[in-house]
Amino acid sequence: MTHSINFKKLLALLMTLVMVMCVFAGCGNKEEEYYSYYEYYEEDDTASDDTQSDDGSTDSNDDGNTTTSSKDEGGSTTEVPKNLRGTTVKMLFWRPLMDAEQKAIDKFEKETGIKVEVKNTPNAGTYGELISSSLAAKEGYDIAMFNNTDFPGRPVQYFQPLNDIKGFDFKDSAWDISVMDTQKINGKYYGVSVNGSLNSEYICMFFNETKFKDRGVKTPREYWEEGNWNWDTFLECAKAMTYEDNGVQVYGYLNRGSSYITYWTQAAGTDFINYDGSKFTANLSDTKLIDTLKFYNDLGHKYKVGDPENTYGVPDFRTGNAAMFSCITYPMRKDSDTKFNQMTDTIDAVPFPMPKGEKEVALIDSTLFGILKGAKNEEGAAVFLRYFLDPANYDMSSYFINKNLESTFNALSKMEKRVSITQGVVNYAAQVDFGNVCHNIALTTADQTSAKLQSYKSNFEVAVQKANKAIED
């Protein structure tokens, strides 16, 4: 009678013997069992046919802290400690999830065995209340978001430092460290972002390509592609595209809103308030800041390429009453509520211009995800964030209105990033609204700019003191 050899059982037996010998010999380290959760492989590692399931996952019968690995169609591998399987990660979100985000969560749950629970608010303006009420009720949510307009108030009040939480490997090149560094507190990260994430909100200059072409004006993209896109060429475009059309005023340029005068200060490499990672300082006497604000004021008052009274340019760009419009990259997406995809004219966008001769960097409104105080599954949350934020887990090309917008987004994701933290600091002090400050400055002429700015000196000093006290405590 012949006996067939069960190679799978034989291999398992040999591996068991090796593990037993290692235990007695003192080899092995529990920390070494914890793998990086998202790795890219140049070659397709093939598992044994008889150990691979239909969905591509492999499993062992161990109950210890080994890993479960699954490979998706894009060639990426998600590896999680086995003790996390069956656990739940809970996230507070500032809006309803998009279809793409829900698909990524569904895929994550299938690959890892970790469940994800999301509670959202239909109004981003009430997001802070959702976080505070959840913490007060001790609901144990793990993840929430803050951005530069919430810094430092939200992170110091609601979040915990990430450096000592198991699951975050900040040597991982996928993390957008240049953004995360802007809102570190005393050397500790409180929020994470991934390069090129769907939630990355870079700042760009949208323009109506159809109107530029109809008037025979050289477009911002043409300037950018020849390496000559700067404040000077921007102003040339804005002047050429300011005109009347059948009695309707078309402006060459409008901004997203009053507070976003900071786009211009960011581009110039200055800000109303500076932050070095441990201390805030008011910067109102900075010559570069004052000159930048004067340039901004001249756009409306001297060159008349924009309307100083206009505090929200989205509808004007959508209707064709503004040829250029500075905003975050969110309107590039087909699902954006700005509805730029419904315009009959062709739109395009390029990076926000720098002063002539300055290095091009990507300006950004940061969206950082962190771990809340009172979190119940910190390690699982770290694993989930690394997956959820990674653009490799999304069909990114399907989200943009057109290919030019996609190429600009991708170019911005590869640049050095620059963030303004002023709005968050000023509004945290609650003495004066930063949007009103910016609007009042925009209404002045260039020669009045410095005096108007200095009129807010005491407000900014109080804001800085309160912010410094917050991070010290």
Image: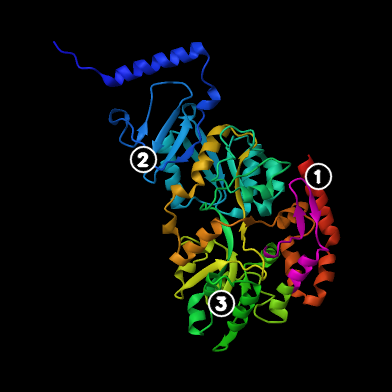
Is 468 above or below relative to 304? above
Q: Which mark is residue 469?
A: 1
Q: Look at discs 2 and 1 and give the one toward the viewer.
A: 2
Left or right: 390 as drawn, with respect to 179: left
The colour scheme used here is: rainbow
The residue range painted magenta reads 267-294
Could you say which quadrant of the image residue 67 lies in?
top left
Is 453 above or below relative to 21? below
Is residue 402 visible from the viewing direction of this image?
no
**What amino acid is at disc 3?**
Ala
Quadrant (top left, top right, bottom left, bottom right) of the C terminus: top right
Determine whether the residue tagged by mark 2 lies in a helix, strand or loop: loop
Marks 1 and 3, the one that precedes in the sequence: 3
Quadrant (top left, top right, bottom left, bottom right) of the N terminus: top left
**What amino acid is at disc 2?**
Asp
Magenta stretch holds residue 293: yes
x then y, percent, for residue 310: 66, 73
Determine whether the residue tagged by mark 1 lies in a helix, strand or loop: helix
Query: Mark 1 and mark 2 in contact (Cβ < 8 Å)?
Result: no
Query: Mark 2 and mark 3 in contact (Cβ < 8 Å)?
Result: no
State the residue position of label 3.
323
Determine whether the residue tagged by mark 3 lies in a helix, strand or loop: loop
x then y, percent, for residue 364: 61, 58
Tell me the CA gap for discs 2 and 1.
52 Å
Q: Looking at the image, which residue is at 73% across and 72% down? A: 442
State the residue position of label 2.
44
Packing grade of label 3 (10 A; few <14, some 14-19, many >=20) is many
x then y, percent, for residue 23: 49, 13
Tell me the CA gap for discs 3 and 2.
48 Å
